[in-house]
Amino acid sequence: MARRNAGVNGVAERIECLHADVMEAYPKLSFEALNIDPPWGGPEYFKKTRFGWQDVSPNPLPLVQKAISSGIAVAVRLPANFSADELRELPPETVVRESRDATRVLFRTAYYPPVD
């Protein structure tokens, strides 16, 4: 799907698609930014009052922390009910933006380093 979308958007020649365990492949990779949109577990996630790193499988926090410590820019999309306490595991400079419709928060995105 990623290859197809890259072709549709005219960027296929600038993107390398890789199917692997990212933590195993990480030392061999070279990139400037990481966008993580992890699976939240289907519609059941919204029934939880509090959602945290351990509720995402696989847990993206180790990858996020590794990328940040390597100087990589990171954006991670999180559900609206993600715990503010668990966001504190990211550097204090991290900015969290909410995406809303007219009545509610749909999801949050954490950015490091902060974006304008």
Image: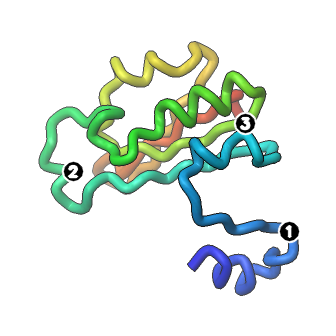
Left or right of 39 on screen, residue 66: right
- Residue 51 figure quarter: top left
- Relative to 20, say whether 79 is above or below: above
Of the image marks 1 and 3, the number of the one nearer the N terminus: 1
Under mark 1, the amino acid is Arg
Extreme residue in the right direction:
13
Counting from the top left corner in percent of width and height, residue 44 is at: 16, 56
Counting from the top left corner in percent of width and height, residue 36 is at: 55, 49
Q: Secondary structure at mark 2?
A: helix
- Residue at left 29%, top 51%? 103
Q: How many marks?
A: 3
Left or right of 77 on screen, residue 39: left
Q: Quadrant of the C terminus?
A: top right
Q: Secondary structure at mark 3?
A: strand
Under mark 3, the amino acid is Ala
- Residue at left 58%, top 49%? 22
Extreme residue in the top direction:
92
- Residue at left 51%, top 41%? 109
Counting from the top left corner in percent of width and height, residue 40 is at: 32, 52
In the picture of the structure, the residue carrying the numbered disc 3 is 73
Report the disc number at residue 45.
Answer: 2
- Residue 26 figure quarter: top right
In the picture of the structure, the residue carrying the numbered disc 1 is 14
Contact (CB < 8 A) between labels 2 and 1?
A: no
Q: Secondary structure at mark 1?
A: helix
Counting from the top left corner in percent of width and height, residue 93 is at: 63, 17
> Label 1 neighbourhood size at 10 Å, few (<14), some (14-19), many (20+)?
few
Q: CA distance from mark 2 to mark 1?
A: 34 Å
- Residue at left 69%, top 68%? 17
The residue closer to the viewer here, 69 or 75, is 69
Of the image marks 2 and 1, the number of the one nearer the N terminus: 1
